[in-house]
Amino acid sequence: MKLATYKNTTRDGRLMLVSRDLKLTCPAAPVAGTMQELLDNWDELAPALQQRYQALCSGDLMGEKFNPLKCHSPLPRAYHWADGSAYVNHVELVRRARGAEVPESFWHDPLMYQGGSDDFIGPYDDIEAPDETLGIDFEAEVAVVTADVPMGTTTTQAAEQIRLVMLVNDVSLRGLIPGELAKGFGFYQSKPASSFAPVAVTPDELGGSWSDAKVHLPLFTHFNNELFGKPEAGVDMTFNFAQLIAHAARTRNLSAGTIIGSGTVSNKQGTEHGSAIVHGGVGYSCIAEVRMIETIRDGQPATAFMHDGDRVRIEMLDADGASIFGAIDQRVKIKK
Amino acid sequence: MKLATYKNTTRDGRLMLVSRDLKLTCPAAPVAGTMQELLDNWDELAPALQQRYQALCSGDLMGEKFNPLKCHSPLPRAYHWADGSAYVNHVELVRRARGAEVPESFWHDPLMYQGGSDDFIGPYDDIEAPDETLGIDFEAEVAVVTADVPMGTTTTQAAEQIRLVMLVNDVSLRGLIPGELAKGFGFYQSKPASSFAPVAVTPDELGGSWSDAKVHLPLFTHFNNELFGKPEAGVDMTFNFAQLIAHAARTRNLSAGTIIGSGTVSNKQGTEHGSAIVHGGVGYSCIAEVRMIETIRDGQPATAFMHDGDRVRIEMLDADGASIFGAIDQRVKIKK
């Protein structure tokens, strides 16, 4: 199934079914009015919704033209959004640039922080920030949405608890990160509202590209209309989504609708730290990585963070070049 | 107004009005079915609910006996739970015990972390933990629930955005904290499910005890039926709730129903680090502080963290000795 949430006058929007080719849509009602309602009652509601989805895709059910510009994030607000840092190459780069080693534990104990989930923004909404000097950066990631996951769930069990797959732009304010990390309490002000691609999909929609609880496809990021990165999301992902979920559930239950992120997708490409598109590599999923490479190579970064009006577009295509989730396509807007 | 949520078969429970003396209750329906529904539509719904509350308190509306054992936390799940550390004495103690100073910035830049809010437990529910050796501790705190707070809200504006006041037990797994802090991403596994006192109250219910966006009353904690702490919540609170809200909203909007915690209530009492009840002081709101004092004094801690079956009770009384919020009263249960 493919699902989206159209904005309306309510906080949770209106749940929509979207055809596999992203061309048609119809309300998920009367089966479910909102995404959270569906997730809260998945076992009960999913079979009827699946029937409705098949009818939409086959043309038996009349749909209207799907318009991603009408979309909020699939979950406009969620009860839990925890972001892992599964691509340890990304972590290694950040540390190397400041002369620090990656602790050995980082290779078997995932990093994870909890982000704001009460106020997600839509895939085409502006990235509002109070000040350009805060170091505004995008981070292109994959995320999953879970069922109810009891405390102590194993990795094997967790793999069965993945309901949906999404793309996310985990916006970061790089200038605030060093200060917050120094305080020891982790990210808070440095992580403003995230956005998600318009369409959330059940894992079966990914076919053979979904295996070992990873998505085995490149994640495309365009920055100001130029290709910036296309790393493979299935490569160099040290912890798969099942491992990330099990980590999150070690000491707590996760409620239905919990979103678990992969962290910035990053490939080593058989080099020290990957390579940019202009150098023939697969590039990067955030500006910070390029700046780290520049710092390691030249002693200082050259690429600037996002300015007012800068645009980022994040998308994933299937083997035939068709968009799976629709695109995140946002511009920075400094809030005067 | 005083409000509680009775458990029922739904995830969000049933919103109840509770009389000022905590003796009677009646459903908040037909005005509002759940606490989140009320918070989402406060301006529209609160006046009618206030009328209903007055009728319950005056006896014009027939109520049933209020039973706190039927209660979930007032918000059984929330979209945002951010906990400050406003009593810097608590932070100072923790640091002093390991020989570290408190950075000067801690006195004007609040510490804040985001906790799990998708799966709160009820005020009388067991504290389930996977293992007694993880260092299970209670933390008695005050918390507020906000209206919609736009990004960039000032402290003055934030003071007007406080809808409700609550008590919270921010359970911590002390044994997991050093490892998580060393990783730099803040608390996650070390902060299992929190619980809240049965009754949430509007600030006006606190009368003169609510001023400067602080609650000026002692917070009582009993550990295994003995008084463990009664520090004044209005004393040594370096950041009031308005300041904590403004800090949280610096780079993001806060949605209605956001919970902001005070951190562990802690008084210096004109001494180096406060004093225990047995030594004539006001005591502490968590076991960790006692262990820090012991470490500073004796080189090592003597008081153990919570064992299977241990009980903690957290309550706040008004000037006449009447319970304002009802009590949090929980036992530890190790999940086999």
Image (cartoon, coloured by chain):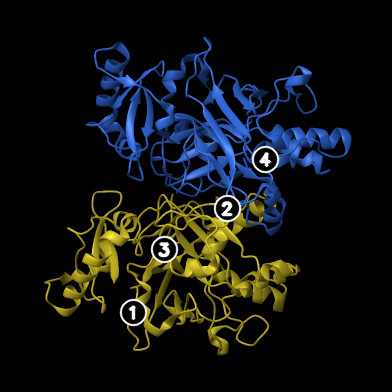
Chain colours: A blue, B yellow
- Horizontal arrangement in the rendering, residue A79 relative to residue A172 (left or right): left
Which residue matches tag 3?
Answer: B145
Q: Nearer the viewer, mark 2 or mark 4?
A: 4
Pinpoint the chain carrying mark 1. B
Q: Are marks 3 and 1 in contact (CB under 8 Å)?
A: no
Co-location on one chain, circles 2 and 4: no
Compared across the picture, whether B111 is left or right of B22 comes to: right
**Badge number at residue B251:** 2
In this rendering, the label closer to the viewer, 4 or 3: 4
Give the foreground label among 4 and 1.
Answer: 4
On residue B142, which mark appears? none
Residue denoted by label 4? A307
Callout 4 secondary element: loop
Q: CA distance from mark 4 to mark 3?
A: 35 Å
Task: Report crowding for label 4: few under 14, some 14 to 19, many 20 or more residues within 10 A (C-alpha).
Answer: some
The x, y position of residue B245, in whole percent, is 51, 63
Tell me, for residue B323, which label it has, or none: 1
Secondary structure of the residue carrying numbered label 2: loop
Q: Residue at x 54, y 47 (%)?
A: A115
**A325 on left or right of A61:** right
- The answer to whether dots 3 and 1 both sit on one chain is yes
**Tag 2 or tag 1, which sits nearer the N-term?**
2
Report the residue that reaches farthest toward the top.
Answer: A320
Tell me the amino acid under the disc marked 4: His
- Residue at 37% x, 82% y: name it: B207
Measured Cα–Cα span from mark 1 to mark 2: 37 Å
Q: Residue at x 73, y 21 (%)?
A: A277
Residue A189's place in the image compared with A207, above or below, is below
Residue farthest to the right, as pictured: A298
